[in-house]
Image (tube, rainbow, N blue to C red):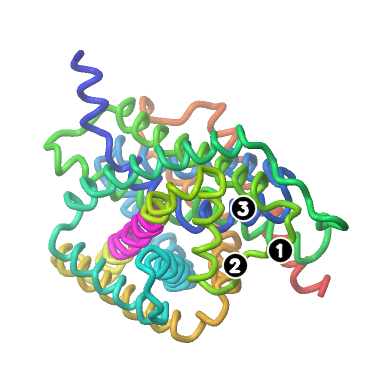
Amino acid sequence: MSTNRKNLLKALGPGILFASTCIGVSHLVQSTRAGADFGYGLVAFIVLALLFKYPFFEFGSRYAAATKKSLLEGYLAEGKWVLWIYFLLSLFSMFTVTAAVTFVTAGMLNNLTGLTIDPTYVSGGILLFCTIVLAIGRYGLLDAMLKIVGTVLLVSTLVAFFASVAKGRVSPVEGFIPPEITERGSLIFIIALMGWMPTAVDLSTWNSLWAVEKMKQIGYTPKLKAVLFDFNFGYIVTAILAICFLTLGANVMYGTGIELSGNSTTFSDQVVTLFTSALGDWAYLIIATAAFSAMFSTTITVVDGFGRAMGETVRLLFFKEANPKRTYNGMILTVSAISFLFILLLAANLKDLVDLATIISFLIAPVIALINYRVITSKQIGEEFRPSKRLLLLAKSGIVFLSVFAIVYVIVYFFMG
C-alpha cells in the first residue's frame, strides 16, 4: 500500500462521525416520511439541500487542516461578537436537537428489545449511558465504535434499498389522492426536511473539532487532501443513504394510506417493518438492530458534538485558562440533563418535536453559513488552503438559498395559517 493511501486511511474518522450524526432523524425519520407521503416528489429538495449546504461543512474541515485549530477559534479571531452569535444561536437548537434524536432512539430500543417502558424514561437512560461513555472514552472510543456501527448500517440499508427496487412499488389504495406540495402543511414539512438534510449547518464546527482531535490521536497533521477525502467520503455516504431511505418510503408506503405515527415506539416499528417488507421477515432482527444502531450513533455523536462545541465556546468566551476536559465533561452533562427535561415537556408528539428541532436549525442556517464564509475567506487562511472560485460561488449561492427558504418559512408559518 502506498504512503499516500496509508495517510488517507489514517485520516479517516471525522467524516464517519459526521455521517453518523447525519444518518439519524434526517434520514430514518424525515427522508422516510418524504418518500411515504410524497413518493419521489421531494428528491430535488433533498439534492438541493445537500448541494447548497456542502461548502459550509467542508469549510470546517478545511479550516482545521489549514490552521490545526477548530472553527470556533476562527470565529473568535474574527471578533468575540462572532463567537457570541454562535453561542446564542446554539442555545436555541442544542437541547431540542438532542431531545429529538434521543427520543427516536428510545423508540428504536423499545422496538428492538420488545420492552414497553415509557420512551421518556428510556431516553433518560440512553443520555446517561452516552454521558458516561464519553466522559470515560472521549474521542478514541467514539471513533472506533462508530466505524463498526456505520459499516453495519451502510450494508443493511443498501441491501434493503436494492431489494425494494427489485420488488417494485406497492400499488396505491383505491381513491388515493397524493398531497399537494404547495399546501401549507407540505411546505412546512419540506422546510423541516431541508433544515436537517444532511444535518444542521451549525454542526459544521463539529467537523473541525473532530479533525483536530484526530490529529492529536494519530500524532501528525494530515495534508489538506487527506482531510477533505475523509470529509467527502462521509458526505457522499450521507447523500446516498438519504436517497435510499426516501426510496424505501416511496416504494413500500406511498399510496398505502398508512400514516407514520407520532408515537416513537410505534413509529420505530413502522420503519423497521418498512425494511423487512422489502427484505422478508427473516431480516427483522438485523434491521431492528441496524435502525437502533443508526439512531444511537446519532445520539452519542450529538451529545459529544454539542458538548465539545459548547464546552470549547464557553472556555473561549469565559474561562480561557480552564481545563478543556473539564469544560467538555461539564457540558455533556448539561446537554444531557436539559435535553431530558425537553423530552419530559415535549415528547407527547414525536413529529412536533422533530419538526421544531429541524425548523430551528434551518432558520439559523443562513447566519452560520455567512460566518463560515467570512472565516474561510479571511487572512487566517493561507493561499494554498483557500477554496476554489467555484466552491466560493457555490457558497454564495448557498447563502442566498438558505436565506430565501428561511424567509419562505416565516411567510408560510405566520401568514398562511
When asked about the image quadrant of residue 94, the answer is: bottom left
Q: Is residue 21 left or right of residue 4?
A: right
Q: CA distance from mark 1 to mark 2?
A: 9 Å
* Image location (x, y in percent) of residue 131: 23, 69
Give the mark, 1 or 2, whose residue is nearer the N terminus. Answer: 1
Q: Give the residue pinned by disc 1.
A: 188
Q: Is residue 159 left or right of residue 150?
A: right
Q: Is residue 212 left or right of residue 59?
A: left
Give the mark, 3 or 1, whose residue is nearer the N terminus. Answer: 1
Q: Residue visible at 55% across and 72% down?
A: 350
- Give the SS element for disc 2: helix
Q: CA distance from mark 3 to mark 1?
A: 10 Å
* Image location (x, y in percent) of residue 356: 58, 71
Q: Amino acid at mark 1?
A: Ile
The magenta segment:
292-309
Residue furthest to the bottom: 345
Q: CA distance from mark 3 to mark 2?
A: 11 Å
- Residue 297 falls within the magenta-colored stretch: yes
Q: Are marks 1 and 2 in contact (CB under 8 Å)?
A: yes
Q: Give the residue pinned by disc 3.
A: 194
Neighbourhood count class around disc 3 (C-alpha, 10 Å): few under 14, some 14–19, many 20 upward: many
Give the mark, 3 or 2, whose residue is nearer the N terminus. Answer: 3
Q: Is residue 65 above or below residue 175?
A: above
- Between 293 and 344, the one nearer to me in the picture: 293
Neighbourhood count class around disc 2 (C-alpha, 10 Å): few under 14, some 14–19, many 20 upward: many
Q: Amino acid at mark 3?
A: Met
Mark drawn on residue 355: 2
